[in-house]
Image (spheres, rainbow, N blue to C red):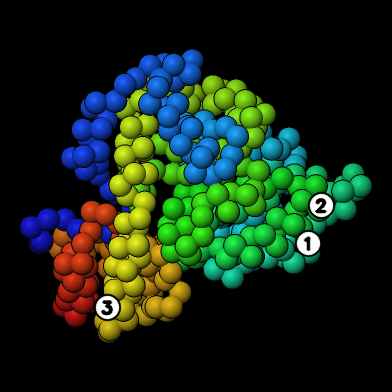
């Protein structure tokens, strides 16, 4: 086993750095639910400036941000159009149905990125009393289920035009929006201009321990506060975790390029391991997906064997594995992980 466990399971595994911990300890706090926490208020203002939106609300998680957005945009029985790999379908415990009583219309976008033409083809007759009323198009950037793919801005703008022409609202799951912005060189505000609401996560590549901020118009955020209260999202003296988010925005945004470089290095190394298959060009950001092809091996078997040897990876399907680079993993760690994976399969 390695002297230090190398955890490539997810970028949610990041831990606060000493500088971030100091910022948290020194944070000025108050009751954020009463708008009295100065650090939370600074974070909200910062996000409005970053994304070009009127208002924002600090939340415990990105999943809550998605659930609140769907509840504000939709009514029971409405339909949300999104990709079949979207987090709101695969990873939120049926929340759209349980929390908002909505239906989902899944699209089959290449690498999780669908087009305006696909949205147009999925539109129902708004005058039909038999069809679900469509209210919302949801975009995930980067697409987790699409191998960390970055949405081209022009493609997103095409989706926006079709949706708005049809009278639909647009929402963005921005769990890894920072990765998309750094990789593409596109301003986060340019992506944000394509949607009515979106959120930014701090707990993944940005390295904070908790939190996400949902942004939109003043009316949208006013209603979001109500749903935050309903869903138990009050955090009171949350300036300590808001300080971590502010530190992340100041120190960990641009360095995401290093994670992308490490992911490409990891992908190229995996391509040279017998018993594994990977499409290296598909790995655009910090998410690396590969197939276990060696006879007698499954993804779960390889995950367990590597864990015993000090390397954490995750089974995505019966044969597919996901590994994620982040700020707590350096190039030397990647070399070690590649050797562990190779030696494990060869044993």
The residue positioned 64% from the left and 30% from the top of the image is 218
The residue positioned 35% from the left and 62% from the top of the image is 257
Q: Quadrant of the C terminus?
A: bottom left
Q: Classify 10 Å Cα crowding around label 1: few (below 14), some (14-19), many (20 and above).
A: some
| Quarter residue 111 falls in | bottom right
Tell me the number on the disc at residue 120.
1
Q: What's the distance in space between the residues labelled 1 and 2, CA to CA? A: 9 Å
Question: Going by the picture, which residue comes out furthest to the left?
Answer: 3
The residue positioned 60% from the left and 23% from the top of the image is 226
Is residue 129 something one can see in this rendering?
yes
Examine the rendered structure and indicate whether residue 306 appears above or below residue 233. below
Examine the rendered structure and indicate whether residue 25 appears above or below residue 321. above
The residue positioned 62% from the left and 25% from the top of the image is 222
Residue that carries the numbered disc 3 in the rendered image: 269
Disc on the earlier residue, 1 or 2: 1
Tell me the number on the disc at residue 166.
2
x then y, percent, for residue 13:
29, 49
x then y, percent, for residue 28:
31, 21
Q: What's the distance in space between the residues labelled 3 and 2, CA to CA? A: 46 Å
x then y, percent, for residue 42:
42, 29
Is residue 96 something one can see in this rendering?
no
| Quarter residue 319 falls in | bottom left
- Which of pointers 3 and 2 indicates the residue nearer the eye? 2
Circle 3 SS class: helix
């Amino acid at each position: 086993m390695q002297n230090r466990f190398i955890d490539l399971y997810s970028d949610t595994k990041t831990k606060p750095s000493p500088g971030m911990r100091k910022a948290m300890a020194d944070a000025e706090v108050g009751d954020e639910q009463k708008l009295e926490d100065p650090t939370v208020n600074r974070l909200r203002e910062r996000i409005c400036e970053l994304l070009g939106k009127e208002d924002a609300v600090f939340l415990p998680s990105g999943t809550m941000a998605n659930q609140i957005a769907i509840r504000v945009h939709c009514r029971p029985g409405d339909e949300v159009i999104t990709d079949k790999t979207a987090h709101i379908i695969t990873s939120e415990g049926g929340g759209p149905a349980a929390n908002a009583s909505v239906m989902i219309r899944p699209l089959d976008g290449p690498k999780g990125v669908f087009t305006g033409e696909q949205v147009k083809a999925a539109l129902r007759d708004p005058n039909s009393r038999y069809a679900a009323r469509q209210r919302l198009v949801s975009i995930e950037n980067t697409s987790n289920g699409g191998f960390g793919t970055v949405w081209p801005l022009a493609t997103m703008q095409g989706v926006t035009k079709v949706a708005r022409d049809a009278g639909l609202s647009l929402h963005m799951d921005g769990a890894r929006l920072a990765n998309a912005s750094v990789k593409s060189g596109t301003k986060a505000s340019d992506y944000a201009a394509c949607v009515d609401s979106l959120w930014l996560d701090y707990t993944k590549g940005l390295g904070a321990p908790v939190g996400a901020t949902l942004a939109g118009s003043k009316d949208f955020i006013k209603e979001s506060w109500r749903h935050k209260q309903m869903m138990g999202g009050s955090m009171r003296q949350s300036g300590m975790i808001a300080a971590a988010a502010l530190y992340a925005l100041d120190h960990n945004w641009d360095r995401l390029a290093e994670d992308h470089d490490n992911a490409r290095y990891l992908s190229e190394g995996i391509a040279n391991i017998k018993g594994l298959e990977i499409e290296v060009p598909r790995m655009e950001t910090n998410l690396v997906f590969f197939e276990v092809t060696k006879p007698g091996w499954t993804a779960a078997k390889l995950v367990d064997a590597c864990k015993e040897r000090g390397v954490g990876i995750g089974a995505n399907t019966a044969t597919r594995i996901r590994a994620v680079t982040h700020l707590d993993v350096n190039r030397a760690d990647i070399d070690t992980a590649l050797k562990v994976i190779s030696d494990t399969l060869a044993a």
